[in-house]
Amino acid sequence: MKYYNFTPSCASKYVSVTKMLNYNEAKYSSCDVCGADNLVDWSSIKPVFECETVTSHRTLPDMILYGGRIIHSFNVWYVVSAAFRDFCEKNFVKGVLFSDVVLVSRRRNKLDSIPERYYLMQITGRAQLDYAKMGVECSVCQKCCHYVYSSEFFPLYDPKGIFPTLLDESTWDGTDVFNHGDCTEVFMEKVCSSGLKGIDFLPYESKFDTASNKRYIRV
Ligand SMILES: [Zn+2]
């Protein structure tokens, strides 16, 4: 099977989320499987995200780029539109979990709430990569999705890149969306014909390749 990886578009025509305003009110804990620390439990809070100002030239995409302080949680997460959530429900997409968020933007130093409904989407699907074949000693924590390395080699931060990225299909839980924005080809094709906007897809094998070699499919 073919797989893809998706991320929010960073095109300037879309507004991005600049910060989470109430992260101090969230509950944090550690993963008891791999020891990852300081992970937000999203069920402990309704996040309030501040966005850039929406104008006729800078609009809200269906998946919003987050440019605030890094917030680790038990699952990889994105801020997505009601249309994205409806798409997932209509297509019975497995491996995602939605909860409410509030979007606000600042005007003359006053916060206005944004009327469009958005959701926090957590990715709960899991699969291991075949790191041994990739020459990396690493695994994905089955509970909190953090990478656990047993060697000095970190593909995410290696400027030389690693190609190809290999999925260990025998460990894939059969979800449509898994790990860090990874997905099936069927999911990618359905998103591409759905009219959803602001999402970049990358062939899975290019995930840890150098930036110049990456060829995106953009909607
Ligand atoms: Zn963990």
Image (cartoon, rainbow, N blue to C red):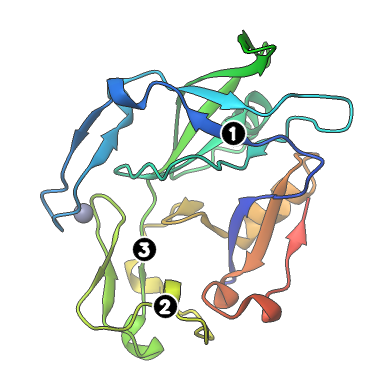
Q: Secondary structure at mark 2?
A: helix
Q: Mark number for residue 156?
A: none
Answer above or below: position of 132 versus 156. below
Horizontally, residue 23 falls left or right of residue 118, namely: left
Q: Nearer the viewer, mark 1 or mark 3?
A: 1
Count neighbours of disc 3 (C-alpha within 10 A) and say few if under 14, some if 14 to 19, many if 20 or more.
many
Disc 1 residue type (three-letter): Val
Of 89 and 150, nearer the camera is 150
Residue assigned mark 3: 127
Provide residue 190's location: percent of width, then percent of height.
Answer: 71, 48
- Tell me which corner region of the image, top left, top right, bottom left or bottom right, holds residue 40: top left
Instruction: Give the residue at x 53% y 84%.
Output: 164
Q: Is residue 33 left or right of residue 171?
A: left
Does residue 119 sit above or below 144 in this rendering?
Answer: above
Q: Is mark 2 within 8 Å of ligand 1?
A: no
Q: Are marks 1 and 2 in contact (CB under 8 Å)?
A: no
User: What is the quadrant of residue 151 in the picture?
Assistant: bottom left
Rendered residue at 40%/18% (across/down) = 46
Q: Residue furthest left?
A: 32
Classed neighbour count for the residue bearing mark 2: other residues with Cα under 10 Å, few (<14), some (14–19), many (≥20): many
Badge 1 is on which residue? 17
> Marks 3/2: CA distance?
17 Å
Is 212 drawn above or below residue 20 in the view shown? below
Mark 2, residue position: 155
Q: Nearer the viewer, mark 3 or mark 2?
A: 2
Give the mark nearer the N terminus: 3 vs 2.
Answer: 3
Judged from the image, the quadrant occupied by ligand 1 is: bottom left
Left of 90 or right of it: where is 42? left
Count of marks placed on residues: 3
The answer to whether 85 appears left or right of 130 in the picture is: right
